[in-house]
Image: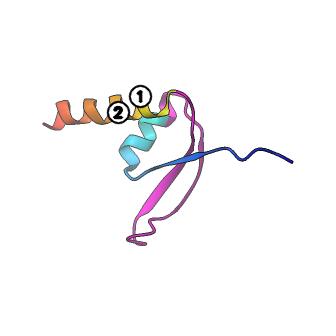
């Protein structure tokens, strides 16, 4: 019996692209469950995922803020 890996969803392409550049594995995409005209990005959950995503979002806020 194999263990299921946890996944995390990113809702903005800009953040997803930065996470990919940081080495996080994009598992796929799917329509946003709330608004299907948008796409969400599915990543493998890792030990550094939350910290890295937080840093990406904070960087974006400083640049756009």
| Image: 12 above or below 49 | below
Question: How would you rate the neighbour count of disc 1 (Cα within 10 Å): few for under 14, some for 14-19, many for 20 or more?
Answer: few
Q: Is residue 58 left or right of residue 13?
A: left
Span colored in magenta: 20-47
In this rendered view, identify the residue nearer to me: 40 or 2: 2
Q: Local crowd at mark 2 within 10 Å, few (<14), some, or many (≥20)?
A: few
- x, y percent for residue 61: 20, 36
The single residue placed furthest to the left in the displayed view is: 65
Q: Do the residues bearing badges 1 and 2 touch, measured as CB atoms within 8 Å?
A: yes
Against 46, residue 7 (above or below) is below
Q: Is residue 40 left or right of residue 25?
A: left
* Residue 29 in magenta stretch: yes
Residue at the (43%, 72%) spot, across then down: 36
Give the labeled residue for mark 1: 51
Q: Quadrant of residue 3?
A: top right
In-image side of 31 versus 61 (left or right): right
Image quadrant for the C terminus? Answer: top left
Q: Position of residue 9 (x, y in %)?
A: 48, 50
In the picture of the structure, the residue carrying the numbered disc 2 is: 54
Q: Residue at x 57, y 39 (%)?
A: 45
Secondary structure at badge 2 equals helix
């Amino acid at each position: 019996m194999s263990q299921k890996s946890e996944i995390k969803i990113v809702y903005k392409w800009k953040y997803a692209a930065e996470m990919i550049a940081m080495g996080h594995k994009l598992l796929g995409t799917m329509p946003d469950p709330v608004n299907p005209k948008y796409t969400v990005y599915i990543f493998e959950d890792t030990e550094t995922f939350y910290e890295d995503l937080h840093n990406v979002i904070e960087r974006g806020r400083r640049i756009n803020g």
